[in-house]
Every structure is written in C-alpha cells, then in structure tokens.
Image (cartoon, helix red, strand yellow):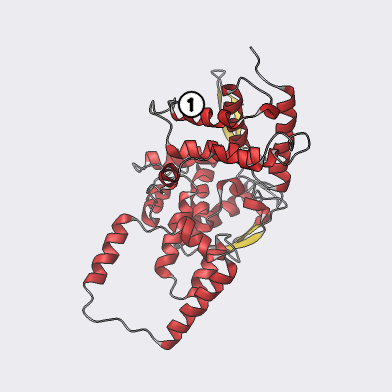
Amino acid sequence: MLRHNPENERIKRAYFIYLKEARRLGEHSIDAAAAALGAFESYTRYRDFKRFHTQQAVGFKRNLAGRVSQRTGDRLSKGTLFTTLNALRAFFHWLAGQPGYRSRLTYADADYFALSEKETRIAKAASERPVPTIEQVLHVVRGMPTTTDVQLRNRALIAFTLLTGARDGAIASFKLKHIDVTEGKVIQDAREVRTKFSKTFTTWFFPVGEVVRQIVVDWVTFLATEKLFGPADPLFPATRVTLGEDHCFQAGGLSRSHWSNATPIRAVFKEAFTNAGLPYSNPHSFRKTLTQLGERICHTPEQFKAWSQNLGHETVLTTFSSYGEIARERQAELIRQLGQVKSQTTYSKDALDALLRFMQEQRREA
C-alpha cells in the first residue's frame, strides 16, 4: 500500500521551509501542520495534491469528526478539529499560489476545510484552567528537597520561572551571562535564547517576594563559585546521566550542556506540584499568575504597560486578551463588592485623562 507520494513530499518540504523562514513559526507549529497533512493524505490514500477536489475536504471533515481520541476514548474535540482543519486550510491556500498548482487549485478551495460558524465558536470557547497563586508556588518551592545538585536546580528552576515569567523554551536555552542578579534582570537575547518570534527584550525581576528572588540568587552564586560555571555555560544545565552499580542509568549530577527542549522542564514542574499535593501547573501558567498579580498591584496605565513589556508583549491588549482572564471566583467577588457600593464612585480629572490616553494608545497599536 502506498505510504507516501514523492510529489507531495517535495511540496510539503517547501511549505515547511516557508513556515519556518517566512512565517517564523516554531518546531511545534510546523509539526502540527505536518501531522494535519499526514492525516489528510492518509484519508485520500496519498493522492497527488494536484488532483485535489473540494469533495475531499468535505469528506475528510466528516471522517475527522467521527474519529475517536486514543487518549480519552471520546470523539475528537471541536478544538482539535478546528486546529487540524485550520492547518490544512492554510496549506491549500498557500498551495494555490505555487507554480504547477495555480491552474489546478483556487484560493477558495481552501475554504472547504472551514468548520461551521457554530462549531468554530465552540472550538474557540475558552475553558477555564487553574492558575497557581503566588502562595501555592511558594508552598511548592519550600517543600522541594535540596540535597543534591539536581534538586537545587529544580527548585531554582521553578523560582526563576515565577521571578521572570520566561517561557520554558527560553529557560532551556539561557546562559549564565544572560542573568544579572545585581541589577535584577534577565536579557532575553534572541541570538542565543529561544524566544517567541525571535524577539529580544529585557525582563526585570517581578516583585514576587524575597524568598523566590533569593533562591535564584543563591543558585547563580552556586553555579559560579561551587561548580565554576562560566558566562557561556547554561543557567539550568541538563542532568548528567551515568551508569549505576546495578547497570541502570541514573542521575549523576549536572552536565555543562543545555536541555535540547523544554520537556524535562515540564517534568520537573509536574513532579514538584504532585509532591506538594497540588494540581499540575505547567511553566506557561506562571505567566497568567504574573498577569493576575499585575492587575491587582498596577494602579496606572503606565505601570501596567511596563508590566506587559516585562512579559515580552508589544501591546497591553495581548496581556489582557491572552492572559488577563479573571478567575470565576475572583469575578464573583468583584461583582459582589460592586453591588455593596452605596455611593457612586467619582474619579479625578487626572485619572480620567490617563485612562483616555491609554485607550487611544491601544487603538494606535492595535
């Protein structure tokens, strides 16, 4: 049975290069596009893309909607359908403009991969996910063991993530020279750090408490004085694997190499939260923790703009729309408090002018 189509493989390779070099997408996004194309090709029995017909898209949508998730045993979620079909829609829209395909495809053909408006709304509906509080993170780090070098690294890793809000991909690639504990900052240099959209910016330590900050300071000092790490060595080195007396692989301390990806970082988080008796919170959820903290302690638009930039966002709207959702319990608390206000609140002219300038700035940036 045919397992691939050489012509399809060549054009897919060109598309993946386009996603990486022109669209600047990361490996995860490109892998997702490859998986979607693989599923579609399997459905069409690897028929040449030049022989594409809109009925193939219609049939594939029906087939995909009837599939069962191997993980849950249920039908694929609307979110999964939306992501897969959206990847195919983007590919065939690009394909319609390529030499050899222009005469066989139209840009409108790609639209047949779209879900209905109702299904799209369901797919895009945001599900509330637990966001760890500062107190919960402190509980986690205080309960982590610190006997070995690896254990010290793991505790510092979680503290650093809260202190800086850095993404796990960037954390895996930080070098010791990128952190300045005296100034309280981390330089996310895209030339050496895997930042989102290859963006370079500086993050100043967030005000999350002296305990968290001191853990990171002690870790940097430990690397420099005890392990004799230099500026080019990793801030969070990978675990050195050795062969034990029982001829089984085991952790043998710290290496001088970077983690190749963020998977080990997520494993550290999962183990730490589980041992602390708390639901697993992934590294990215800490950015929402910091956003919620900023919403409470920032009192002017300028302050929240600085907070947003510290997370690496170019506009405050990104912080609000992607990370600023208020938890339902907090939402209920705020609404109840508003209902208890007996007199109408008045605002000073300076406060209103500041709010107006802020809204105008966001319109220009949008």
Q: Residue at x 44, y 47 (%)?
A: 124
Dot 1, how many residues are within 10 Å of its Cα: few (below 14), some (14-19), or many (20+)? few
Q: Is residue 366 visible?
A: yes
Locate the C terminus and report the quarter of the image it occupies. Answer: bottom right
Q: Is residue 28 visible?
A: no
Q: Residue at x 78, y 37 (%)?
A: 99
Q: Which residue is mark 1?
A: 63
Residue 238 on image: x %, y %: 61, 38
Residue 334 on image: x %, y %: 29, 66
115 left or right of 366 in image: left
Q: Residue at x 21, y 72 (%)?
A: 340
The quadrant in which residue 227 appears is top right
Q: Is residue 274 above or below residue 218?
A: above
Identity of the residue furthest to the bottom in this view: 349
Q: Could you say which is closer to the camera, residue 59 or residue 77?
A: 59
Q: Is residue 287 above or below residue 119?
A: below
Q: Amino acid at mark 1?
A: Asn
Residue 269 on image: x %, y %: 47, 42
Locate the N terminus and report the quarter of the image it occupies. Answer: top right
For mark 1, give the secondary structure: helix
Residue 123 on image: x %, y %: 44, 43
Q: Is residue 67 above or below residue 351?
A: above
Q: Could you say which is closer to the camera, residue 259 or residue 310?
A: 310
